[in-house]
Image (spheres, helix red, strand yellow):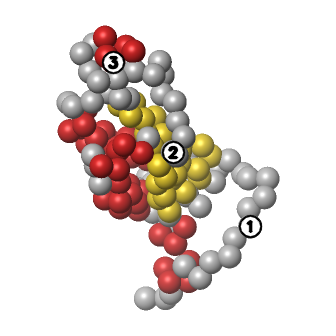
Amino acid sequence: MPHLVILYTPQLDAETDLSALCRRLADTMLAQRDAEGRAVFPPGGTRVLAFPAAHHAVSDGGAAGRAAGGNGDYAFVYLNLRMASGRPPAVVQGAGDALLAEVKAHFAPLFAQRHIGITLQVDEGAPAFDGKHSNLHPLFNRAV
């Protein structure tokens, strides 16, 4: 862990490059440093995954958007970063601010064209169960 999961309304697939956003967000996570300059997130555990919502309902179904002169086709992006507890609040805030800045920059062109809502939520804590099986971490733990 950390894992950043993105759920979005599927019309966005035709309007923006979600794979590029995933890469930008992973790079942003890997660039985060604590007060001592140490990496906040381990490279082997950092994941960014995006999924279109096959079924969705957003807000009032488009009535307010049509009344405002739009087509009523609302889009939505929900990002949830899950990480283990133990990082100082300033580090969590800094990571959230950096990720939100990247998301806002990525979607800025769409804000001028359509109605879209974006939520980034950061959750931290100890899971009740945390099973892992990976051969990725050793790639980053080799002695240099």
Q: Is residue 92 above or below residue 116?
A: below
* Quarter-of-image position of residue 11: top left
| Residue type marked 2 | Ala
* Quarter-of-image position of residue 116: top left
Residue at 20% across, 39% down: 109
Q: Is residue 30 above or below residue 136?
A: above
Q: From the viewer's side, name the closer residue of 75 and 133.
A: 75
SS label for mark 2: loop
Q: Along the polypeptide, which appears first: circle 3 or circle 2?
A: 2
Relative horizontal placement of residue 77, taking residue 138 as reference (left or right): left
Mark 1 is surrounded, within 10 Å at the Cα level, by few (under 14), some (14 to 19) or many (20 or more) other residues, namely: few
Q: Which residue is mark 1?
A: 131
Relative horizontal placement of residue 89, taking residue 37 as reference (left or right): right
Residue at 38% across, 34% down: 75
**Image location (x, y in percent) of residue 52:** 47, 49
**Image location (x, y in percent) of residue 45:** 54, 67
Q: From the viewer's side, name the closer residue of 113 and 89.
A: 113
Q: Along the polypeptide, which appears first: circle 1 or circle 3?
A: 3
| Residue type marked 1 | Gly
Do callouts 1 and 3 mark residues in contact (Cβ within 8 Å)? no
Q: Which mark is residue 90?
A: none
| Residue type marked 3 | Gly
Q: Is residue 99 above or below residue 76?
A: below
Q: Which residue is mark 3?
A: 65
Q: Is residue 110 visible?
A: yes
